Image: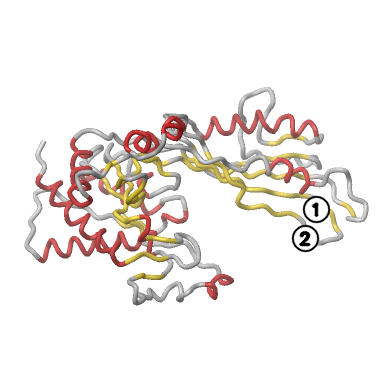
Amino acid sequence: MAHQDTVPVPDNTVERWTHPPFDGHIDSAGWIWGRGSGDCKNLLIGELSAINELLRIGFNPQRTVLLSFGFDEEGGRVRSAQHLSAHVESVYGKDGILFIIDEGEGIKEDYFGRTFVTPALGEKGSTNVELTVAVPGGHSSVPPAHTGIGILSRWSQRREPSNPFSAYAQCLAEYGEIDSALKKALSPRRLMTTQAVDIIHGGVKVNALPEQATAVVNHRISVDSSVKELQARYVKLLTPVAKRFNLTVVGMSSTKACLDFNTQVPETATRYLKLSTPYGSDASPVSPYSGSAWDIFSGTAKHLWGEEAIVAPLLMNGGTDTRAFQNLSRAIYRFQPIRSTDRYDIHTVDERIHIDGHLNTIRWIFALIQNADAFRE
């Protein structure tokens, strides 16, 4: 799998690029510059190139090999992937696929003294919570003790995230060349839901107090949590906030764990705190790291990167089109065979990959397809 679309390039950042973002420039050092080069057009082209080479040498697979390329993954709702998955399921049935590979984590060389191959065996869920504070406006020369923006800011600054560990840390602790104190720190722990305040706006003039201020908080839901659990946490956190600032709460209740987060504001309300969640998805199931599919995957990895390489499972913070493919296989591995030093600046200015990373992608797919084809239950 791979997706055809990219995130946009804001007009005000184009001049900051070393080379134009859609020129596909290849420099003398072997770097391929451009939006989507690392996420994940290299994987898409690598898959097509590997298939083309297999056909050229006369490879005749006994297993069916499917390629699936959605076109709206970056939009977050995987509409095209849903149609692709439904078609495959109609042909091969539920759990009818041996394993699925999509974009994801990569390779870390000379990392704590070892090479780590890090497929993501699951991915966090995602939901946005929109918080709107409404208060009476007025002239900015006579502000109240707490403006709408002020109330929102006091809450938002406490919602910035701390970084989670993953099962990957356990492999570092066991195999990495690190001191004993760090080994202890990398012991198994709860995988946390992260949150980031990504959008905040309110007010249109410097001399007018805004009647409304809004913040949108993006959450990546841990595998041991859920959207409903997150909503219940908001109820617990914001009930006292609303009470302190004398705000009517819309979208939650202090007497019931969770109500509809998308309820309408009463027409008579002038001071309120409204919460809404336009959409949300829980974390994916976690793929097994034992059994036939894992043996094929890890065996191919060790063949290409050495028997001493550690194939260590990760949890992916971002989302992929595999969210729509859960019915097709339990073994879903989100992985791109690229070293961390061969890919930079995904989703921002000067996104680029090195040609060596792209060639490794072709080699990986070329070998993986043949190894899967040779496997018999």
Task: Locate residue 92: give its quadrant.
Answer: top left
Q: Residue at x 45, y 35 (%)?
A: 182
Would you say 373 lies left or right of 192 here? left
Seen as rendered, the residue at the extreme right is 142
Seen as rendered, the residue at the extreme top is 255
Image quarter in which the C terminus is found:
top left
Are the two marked residues, 1 and 2, in contact with CB atoms closer than 8 angstroms?
A: yes
- Mark drawn on residue 356: none
Would you say 82 lies left or right of 293 here? right
Q: Residue at x 74, y 42 (%)?
A: 154
Residue count near mark 1 (Cα–Cα under 10 Å), binned few <14, some 14–19, many ≥20: many
Task: Locate residue 55: give its quadrant.
Answer: bottom left
- Given the image, on which type of amino acid does mark 1 rest? Pro
Q: Residue at x 31, y 51 (%)?
A: 84
Residue assigned mark 1: 210
- Check the image and report above or below for 290 versus 69: above
Residue count near mark 2 (Cα–Cα under 10 Å), binned few <14, some 14–19, many ≥20: few
Give SS at disc 1: loop
Q: Residue at x 59, y 71 (%)?
A: 12
Q: CA distance from mark 1 to mark 2?
A: 7 Å
Q: Is residue 83 visible?
A: no
Would you say 12 lies left or right of 120 here? right
Q: Nearer the viewer, residue 227 or 152?
A: 152
Residue assigned mark 2: 204
Q: Is residue 263 visible?
A: yes
Give SS at disc 2: loop
- Given the image, on which type of amino acid does mark 2 rest? Val
Q: Report x, y in % for residue 326.
A: 33, 40
